[in-house]
Image (cartoon, helix red, strand yellow):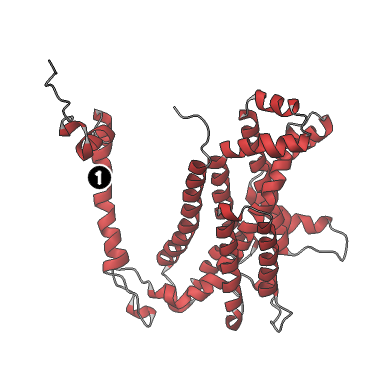
Amino acid sequence: MASTTESMAPPNLQTGPIAWVRERLFSSPLNAILTILSIWLLAATIPPIIEWGLIQAHFTAATSAECRGQPGACWAFIGEKYRLIFFGLYPYAEQWRPLIAGLILIGMIIVSCMPSFWKPRLLVIWIVGLVAVGVLMWGGILGLRFVEDTLWGGLPLTLILATFGIAIAFPFGLILAMGRRSKMPAIKTLCIMYIELIRGVPLISMLFMSSVMLPLFLPEGFSIDKLLRAQIAIIMFAAAYIAEVVRGGLQAIPKGQYEGADSLGLSYGQKMGLVVLPQALKVVIPPMVGLFIAAFKDTSLVVIIGIYDLMQSTKVSLTDPAWRGFSIEAYVFIAFIYFIFCFSMSKYSKALEDRLATGHKR
C-alpha cells in the first residue's frame, strides 16, 4: 500500500526573513544586545546627519554670508571651490588638461580590470595612455603651454601618485619576494635587509628623507624633482609590503606544486610564471587589494612636503577668508571621493576573487 505521507514545507519560523533575523541578529543574548545597541546608534546618528547634509543644507548660496549661522551644511562652498580642490594650483585656463589626464588614468585602470584585455595589447594601452597623460600635464608640445609639476595638484596628482606607485611597486615587490626565498645567500640577504628596513620606517619619515635628506647626498648641480622623489618613496614603501604579502602566498603553495613543475623540466622562470605565482597571487588577492587601498590613501601624506594633492588642495581652499569655516563640508566631500575609489577597489577584488575561485570548496 502506497504511503499517503507527503513531505511538508518547514514552518515559516525556520525559513525566510524571520529565520534570517533570528539566526543572524538574535542568535544569543549577546548578539541581541549588540543588535539593539546598533539599532539605537543608527537611529541616533543617521537622522541628524541626513537633516544636516540634505534637508537643511544650502546648495546654491551666492555668498558665504547666506550660510553662516544656518544649521545645515553649506555645499555651496564645494560649488565655489571645486576647481581648486580638484586641480590645485594648475593654471585655471588649462584645467581641462588634468581633467582629461585623470579620465585617461581612470579609463586605463578600468580597462585593466577587464579580463578580455589581459593580453599583450594592454601594455600598449598603458604606454600610449601614460605618454598622453605626460603630454597633457606637462605640455610644451603640440601647442600646449608648459606647466611645471610644482603647479600640479588635486585629484589628478593623487591618481598619478597612486597609479605609478602601485604599478611600479607591484613587480618590484614580486622580485623582492622571490629574492627573499632565493637559495643564493647574497640575494636573499639583500632582499631581507631591504624589506625589513623599509617596513620598519614610517612612510612620513621616508617622504621627509626623500625631500630633505636625499638632495644632500646628490652631486653638486644635480637635483631630482620633488614630485619624483615623493613618487620614489611611495614605490619603495609599497614594494616592501607587497613583497611580504606575496611571500606569504608563495609559502601557502604546497610543496608538490614546486616538485611537479620541476618534474616537467620547467626552468625557474617558467615554474614561477606558469605554476607558482598564479596560484600564490590568487591566494593573496584580499590582502593585496588592502595594500593597494592603503597606498591610495597614503598618497595624502605628501601634504607634509608641500605637494598639492587632493588633501592639500582642499586645505588651500579653506584659507579663503570669504569662505573660511566650512572645513567639515570640505573634508566630507574629499572623504566621499576617497570612499568611491577605495570601495570600487574592494568590490572589484571580491569579484575577481570569486572569478578565480577554482579551488576545492567545503
**Position of residue 33 measured from the top left corner of the image (x, y, whole percent):** 24, 35
> From this viewpoint, is residue 259 visible?
yes
* Residue lying furthest front: 1
Looking at the image, residue 248 lies above or below residue 148:
above
**Position of residue 124 measured from the top left corner of the image (x, y, whole percent):** 70, 61
Q: Nearer the viewer, residue 14 or 37?
A: 14
* Residue lying furthest right: 220
> From this viewpoint, is residue 88 visible?
no
Which residue is found at the position 66% from the left and 23% from the top?
256
Q: Please name the residue that numbered disc 1 is placed on.
A: 39
Looking at the image, residue 224 lies above or below residue 271:
below
204 lies left or right of 209 = left
139 lies left or right of 66 = right
Q: Nearer the viewer, residue 155 or 118?
A: 118
**Position of residue 303 measured from the top left corner of the image (x, y, whole percent):** 60, 61
Occupied quadrant, residue 273:
top right
* Residue lying furthest top: 1
Which residue is found at the position 48% from the left and 49% from the top?
346
Which residue is found at the position 66% from the left and 73% from the top?
137
Which residue is found at the position 25% from the left and 45% from the top?
39
Q: Nearer the viewer, residue 125 or 227?
A: 125
Residue type marked 1: Ile
Rate crowding at label 1 as few (under 14), some (14 to 19) or many (20 or more) other CA atoms within 10 Å: few
Occupied quadrant, residue 52:
bottom left
201 lies left or right of 340 = right
**Position of residue 203 measured from the top left corner of the image (x, y, whole percent):** 64, 49
